[in-house]
Image: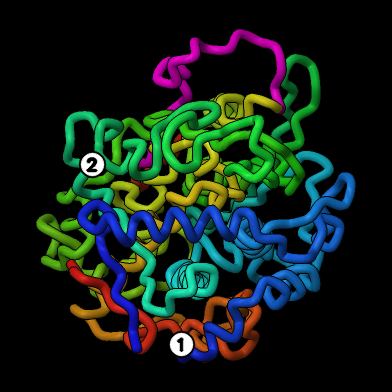
Amino acid sequence: MAVVRRNIITNPAVRDAFIEGVLRLKREDSTLKTTAFGIPGPPTPVRTYDLFVIWHYKAMMTPVPPNGDTDIRNAAHRGPVFLPWHRFMLSLLEAHLQRVLGDPGFGLPYWDWSIDGSLPAPETALIWKPDFMGGQGDPVSDGPFAFNPADPNGFRVRLDSGPNVNLRQTDRGLRRAFASGSPTLPNALDVGAAFNTLPAPFGDPDLATYDFAPWLANSRGFRSRLEGFTGTGLHNQVHRWIGGDMAPASSPNDPVFYLHHANVDRLWEGWMNRHGRTYLPSMAESADLLGHRIDDPLISPLGAGATPRTTLDNTALFTYDVVP
Amino acid sequence: MTPEELAAAADPATLGNYLSALPEPPHHHGPLTSVRHDVFQGHHIMIRTTYEVTVDGAPLNAPLVVSDDGQVHSHALPTYEFLSATETIRALIGNFPDDFPGGVRPADDVHDRNLPHHVHRTGDEGGS
């Protein structure tokens, strides 16, 4: 039976379950060590939560095409597969959270950042209060993910990526620096504009189509608008506004990553409600797009069982309490 | 995809073993070169751009590329696009404080960090 993904602000029980589940995954030994992933340094146990950091990093470092450049297009970003890949990633995290919580009915909550983006001071929003995700800092010093140097089982960042985009070991608290990379969050007008398919200058009819050739970061269509390489910024802008550990390739270090991407996924679901469960590019496109075409396997442990097509209708897995 | 399939995959070893078998990501050992092509009035234009950057005299091997529209991008900050390489390096310094020791750190108030904000203007041709 499908679980329901709910707004974290108005559902304290789901909020508390999410926090507890994240902390359990942070404590759980995956049984693999850092050396298994080619991460320099002494062999160190990798926690299950941190596997998702590695996954995101490795997908981001997989160029498409294989002899191409990850900065141009990679297996999870800067192209059509951005939304399907993250949808699957969230679903697998949700399944892990259900496992460690012993609750198959748990649904990953979402954070509707466009509401906070309409505030004059988004840093004062409820989501950053100690009962929710805690606030900003280096390290974050309040809330459930606050750094306690004396607690080896507390929330710590153990893997991150640096300026050379190398995955490396570390041992420190979570970092956030609000407004460091963008002066504010996207607001409701920005989201509304992404759904506005009226003729120019009132809207953009291309937004009724998922994506367009040449299938690059800033191609026309809805995907690039939601990813944030065209228009006002949306997904990208949220990463930049939160800053700190949300900025580099290791951004799943911050649990807010999942609340943010659940909202991005909810917006995609809203688009599909309007325009159908359609996706481009098709398999007729060049193999140079391997990994982005509709029946190409995602970078995922399910192999051929997880493709963009298999993510288009996931209503058997989850629904949202409100779809815009 | 069914809930049962996902539940079966929700095992740490399943994800961990899969990830450990993936190819090693490419490592950046030096400056990248961006090659841009354009055709104008029947002329073929090729622009090769290589940034050689030092910070405090030390080489910085962060990957910097220029897209066809002239924006600068570093995969180290994947959600940013910059109008200049200078903005990019400033953002790298601000976002990776442990990698740039010394200097003058801003006050503890993170609002004073004065990191360059992302600038995105569709169609802008700046910065390369």
**Disc 1 residue crowd, few under 14, some 14–19, many 20+, Cα 10 Å:** some
Q: Residue at x 83, y 43 (%)?
A: B29
Residue at the spot of label 2: A117
Q: Circle 1 sits on which residue?
A: B3
Residue B78, position in %: x, y?
54, 48
Residue at image coords 61%, 47%: B75
Residue B104 counted in the magenta span: yes
Q: Position of residue A269 (x, y in %)?
A: 28, 74
Magenta part, dominant SS: loop
Q: Is residue A319 left or right of residue B107?
A: left
Q: Is residue A69 visible?
A: no
Name the quadrant containing residue A221.
bottom left
Residue A322 relative to residue A260: left or right = left
Chain for numbered disc 2: A
| Residue A248 x, y percent position in the rendering | 58, 44
Q: Amino acid at mark 2?
A: Gly
**Amino acid under disc 1:** Pro
Find the magenta span and give its range: B99-120
Its colouring scheme is rainbow
Q: Nearer the viewer, mark 2 or mark 1?
A: 1
Q: Which residue is rendered at x = 18% and y = 56% of the image? A: A193
